[in-house]
Amino acid sequence: MNLKEMSLVDMEDQLRMARSAYRKAKKDHAALREAFWDTFNPKVRDWLKRHEQAQNLGRVAQAINGKLDSLQVKVVEHEGSLCDTKEQIEEVLLAVNKAKVHSSEDTDFLTSPLVEEFGYQGNEQTENIVLQGSYVLLLWPLATPSCS
């Protein structure tokens, strides 16, 4: 129906239905977000989840450092529940921080063959070769040509 042809009562009904749909979608936002993420390939989906987790951790850190409205963290929301004691807040923050630290474990530089080439703390010689633009990935173990 065209907006110009709608009566005031029809417009109010449409507005009421739109608000109801919005409230329902807002209530189910976590499930809808997960369903949306599932439409992506696993690598992109995992990146999106890590990115959002880092944003949430940043918000918590801002609250702790007093850069948000309050100067003290009194309540932290985690997975739909409110944590309001010091022990609960520490437990949540430690778990979130640990997850953030371990989120890089499945990245390219921490899996074979790059971890062997660069190591866990870097390899200055290999890094310089990369910066010079002459790096060639050596497959490990090196295949030895055979003469027949």
Image (tube, rainbow, N blue to C red):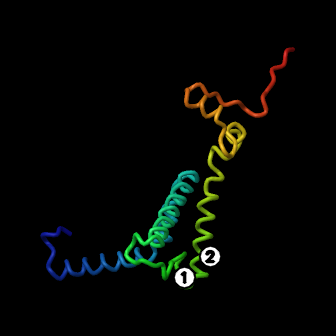
- Say which mark, if any, is on residue 95: none
Given residues 44 and 123, the one toward you in this image is: 123
Q: As drawn, which residue projects farthest toward the bottom?
A: 85
Q: Are marks 1 and 2 in contact (CB under 8 Å)?
A: yes
Q: As drawn, which residue projects farthest toward the top?
A: 148
Q: Quadrant of the N terminus?
A: bottom left
Number of residue marks: 2
Where does residue 120 sit, x and y in percent of width and height?
A: 68, 46
- Name the element at disc 1: strand
In terms of sequence position, does the residue under pointer 1 or pointer 2 come before the other? 1
Disc 1 marks which amino acid? Cys
Position of residue 90 in the picture relative to residue 63 (left or right): right
Q: Which residue: 58% across, 68% down?
A: 96
Q: Which residue: 49% across, 67% down?
A: 56
Disc 2 marks which amino acid? Glu
Position of residue 94 in the picture relative to residue 80 (left or right): right
Q: Which residue is mark 2?
A: 91
Q: As drawn, which residue projects farthest toward the right?
A: 148
Q: Which residue: 61% across, 57% down?
A: 103
- Mark 1–mark 2 Cα distance, whole angstroms, equals 9 Å
Q: Which residue is mark 1?
A: 83
Where does residue 63 sit, x and y in percent of width and height?
A: 45, 72
Crowdedness near tag 1: few (<14), some (14–19) or many (≥20) residues, C-alpha within 10 Å: some
Quadrant of the image occupied by residue 139: top right
Where does residue 127 sit, x and y in percent of width and height?
A: 61, 34
Q: Which residue: 47% across, 68% down?
A: 32
- Name the element at disc 2: helix
